[in-house]
Amino acid sequence: MKMSKLFVQTLREYPSDAEVVSHKLLVKAGFIRKLTSGVYNYLPLMWRVLKKIENIVREEMDRAGAQELLMPFVQPKELWEESGRWGVYGKELMRLKDRHNREMCLGPTHEEVITSIARDGLKSYKQLPVNLYQIQSKFRDEVRPRFGLLRGREFIMKDAYSFATCQEDLDKEYQNMWNAYTRIFNRCGLDTKAVQSDSGAIGGSVSHEFMVITDTDAGENDVFYCNDCDYSANSNHAISKLPEAVIDGKGYFKEAKVLDTPNTHSIEELSAFLNIPSTLILKSLVYIVDKKPVIALIRADKAVEETKLMNAAGGVEIRIATSEEIAEMMEQHGFNAVPGFIGPKGFEDIPLFADETVRDMKNYVVGINQTDKHLVGANHSDLGRELNYVDIRLVERGELCPQCGKPLFVTRGIEVGNIFQLGTKYSKPMNAVYLDQNGKAQPYIMGCYGIGISRTAAAAVEAHYDEHGIKWPVAIAPYHVVIVPVNVNDELQMNVAEKMYNDLQAAGIEVVLDDRDERAGVKFKDADLIGFPYRVTVGKTIAEGLVEYKVRETDEQEKYTPEEATQKLISSIKSVLG
RNA sequence: CGGGAUGUAGCGCAGCUUGGUAGCGCACUUCGCUUGGGACGAAGGGGUCGCACGUUCAAAUCGUGUCAUCCCGACCA
């Protein structure tokens, strides 16, 4: 490709609306342009990158035995009613009506459609297991799109769905996809970590997310990991061991009694007033899950992880209750205490979840719904109901690995892929069944596996850049090499540059010849910004028969004859591409 | 949806307080000059000032409304 004809407009300045590196650089270097909020044009350079990622994904999925298909972008409401998600998916589901007033949606994911395909086509156990995938644009009407391609509303995704007759086959396919994902991200030049995660609205039980680790704002997830073993998890799913703590207050309280605790609205104030560690206080928190109140009990020095509580309560939406809502709840139950003095007793009709940290607490302090009073020396028998224990605790820095007991570390990550075990979450309600050996109808055991193609591209930029621009990994770079003749009016320089250009192209290398009549500085700036992995400069040293060879990633720089440089480029690039 | 801001040429911005010919830098076109890290000179092209209504002799500028975009909090590839 001749640079003079390449459709690209690099900018001198960063766009004013971009926050994160990948967004700034992709716009400045002329890869993308925003069309409307969260929706981007993929310009020719970007499209080449995306196609390369797609092809890597395609090759590895095919190699793993999956079959590609393509499903519609628009889906009918009826299917979503079958799965029960029309009502629960929320506003991210872009709903629309056709001219006959039939309700439709833009596909944010395709469990429903693939399940309907499967139940029509997979009638016998002899056809299973099967894994079907597609690469397609998705639309999710995100509340707040941001970070350019990292969180667009429209984005390109590879989504795969597996169907099996038993858990064992699902486990096998799950591992198979895990291995494929590891190969895919490696080939894309990305280091990823597979972390345990919450399964969210898509549902299911076991799931992992593939994270590109990046300690910048672009990483929207907190990842806890252990350096001594393989444990790692998204913060919404992480568990930990806690250091030893005082959880029996018998040294402080001889018997259970109500004590005046004036103005102790916070845990800090209460523990200071009573002169006890906060680990002896039982904290009662009120959340609103799907518009209904839920009480969470947890040891007072710890915080609640809302996603865990939401899952325990079986909801899809959670937030902490407002003080007005708490006041209303108090009133309905004949109390008038303010937040800070809430206790579980007297709210027997409200669902209650006690964190595991509560299980072994004894002779502790708890609110009794009376302002300026607490019950001290309390035990579970004083709470007025049986406690059901569940882990709803937010893991924090400094806690210990649940597997090996060493300290956990935390970092930020960009989620570029995930794998879920769905089980029969969709096949059962949608009556998607096959006949087993005994002729009996059985629902498929399903899994689903996603990769954000456009997000992976952006994550690659987050992981590979410097102050001059992008440093694309060779495997996904829009072009491998740029040849820069310093002076296009110098016949010798141009002849050498064109010969190398032709030779490299003949060898299957993707190369751009910067034939613009610009000063060298302009061409170098653009080459660095766009991020060509290799640059060859044909300048004055051609008089001695030498050209300059430069590697963008490492800044390694050498002088070679044109023939040597050509050979070196071919062998370096071929060794990466395999 | 709450809270904060911004809409003026492809990009980045000034002008608005105090109403009167729409400006600057980059990019683009032509010519000259220059050619190893975003040169220089000259001459050009390009704008419904987000939109609507209002006030006024006159609105980018004042008022009302509306739309869009961005940033901070709850979702997810």
Image: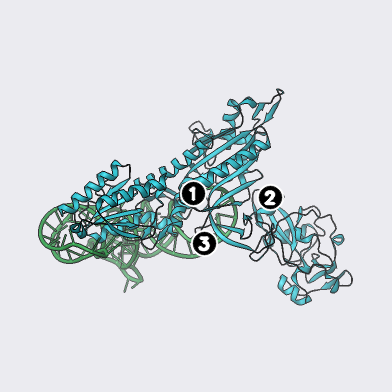
Q: Is residue B22 positioned above or below A453 on the image?
A: below
Sequence order check: which comes first, mark 1 or mark 2? 1
Query: Residue A396 versus residue A93: which sits nearer the camera?
Result: A396
Q: Residue at x 60, y 38 (%)?
A: A173
The residue to which callout 1 is attached is: A186
The chain identifier of the residue carrying mark 1 reads A
When asked about the image quadrant of residue A175, the answer is: top right
**Proximity of marks 1 and 2: CB atoms separated by less than 8 Å:** no
When asked about the image quadrant of residue A542, the answer is: bottom left
Chain identity for the colour green used in the image? B
Q: Which residue is drawn at 37% across and 48% down?
A: A573
The percent coordinates of residue B58 (x first, y second) are 28, 60
Q: Which amino acid does label 1 sit on?
A: Asn
Is B52 left or right of B32, judged from the image as shown? right
Is A184 left or right of A87, judged from the image as shown? left
Q: Is residue B9 positioned above or below B13 on the image?
A: above
Tell me the quarter of the image containing the C terminus of chain A.
top left
Chain identity for the colour cyan used in the image? A
Sequence order check: which comes first, mark 1 or mark 3? 1
- Both on one chain, marks 1 and 3? yes
Residue depth check, mark 1 versus mark 2: number of the one nearer the observer: 1
The chain identifier of the residue carrying mark 2 reads A
The percent coordinates of residue A418 (x first, y second) are 57, 46
Q: How crowded is mark 2: few (under 14 residues within 10 Å), some or many (20 or more)?
A: some
| Residue A311 - label | 2
| Residue A215 - label | 3
Secondary structure of the residue carrying tag 3 is loop
Secondary structure of the residue carrying tag 2 is helix
The percent coordinates of residue B39 (x first, y second) are 21, 65
Sequence order check: which comes first, mark 2 or mark 3? 3
Q: What residue type is labelled 3?
A: Asp
